[in-house]
Image (spheres, rainbow, N blue to C red):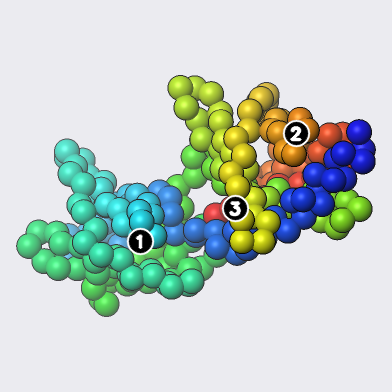
Amino acid sequence: MKKAIVLILALVGGIVSESAAQADYWVGKWEFFVKETPQGDVKMTGNLVRKDGKLTGDLTPITSQATEKIAISSIEESADKIVLFFSAAGYDLNLALNKVDGDNLKGLLADSFEASGKRLKSNDFFAGKWEIVVVDTPNGDAKFITELVRKEGKLAGDLKMTAGDAKETIPAKVEEAEGKITLYFSAQGYDVNVELNKVDDDNLKGTLMNMFEAKAKRVK
């Protein structure tokens, strides 16, 4: 059986280190805070998604009254900076923010007012994108990406692999318990599982088939 696992690891050994490098930092929910405007401090949430390769989304002001979403008309982005263009109260505005760390942004609204952004994390700990690394296999470390989503109360997902120019997505069955998750999937005719336990907010640790050490890091 161990030989079969080694064969599988050889086949996925070139797995998506490339995908990890392309991790989409900006996608997700954010809370934005603009200080000392003529109307006082302003808070709003932003939901950023990628469609057809382009970043888009909307903003929702946080006020004591009913709120309406504001469409973001366009977004300019680079690895470390993002600029959101939108209209509010009859004015065309832009919110320019620079990356501070994995979860925080800092910049200006309309080149005038100090602004910041903070990533809003889901209460669903395991949901999201993870990079899994199986270490010290006979073929070196094997890496792959899994994206877990909750559908009808159950966690589901897939594994995204690359082998040369070929790309394959493998569905995975997910079992979860308090602080623990197990992914079951098939590769090259073999049934394989990766068991991972929560270490902290962004890291997991466990084994592949109880043979090889495995660890996972949340992709932000």
Q: Quadrant of residue 90?
A: bottom left
Given the image, on which type of amino acid does mark 3 rest? Lys
Q: Are marks 3 and 2 in contact (CB under 8 Å)?
A: no
Q: Position of residue 176 (x, y in %)?
A: 65, 26
Q: Categorize mark 1 by other alpha carbons within 10 Å: few (<14), some (14-19), many (20+).
A: few
Q: Which residue is mark 3?
A: 167
Near-viewer residue (140 or 12): 12
Q: Are marks 3 and 1 in contact (CB under 8 Å)?
A: no
Q: Which callout, 3 or 2, points at the residue further toward the start of the chain?
A: 3
Q: Which residue is mark 1?
A: 54
Residue placed furthest toward the left: 90
Near-viewer residue (217 or 52): 52
Q: Position of residue 207 (x, y in %)?
A: 82, 39
Q: Is residue 164 left or right of residue 194?
A: left
The CA distance from mark 3 to mark 1 is 21 Å
From this view, report whether residue 72 is shown above or below residue 120: below
Q: Is residue 141 left or right of residue 62?
A: right
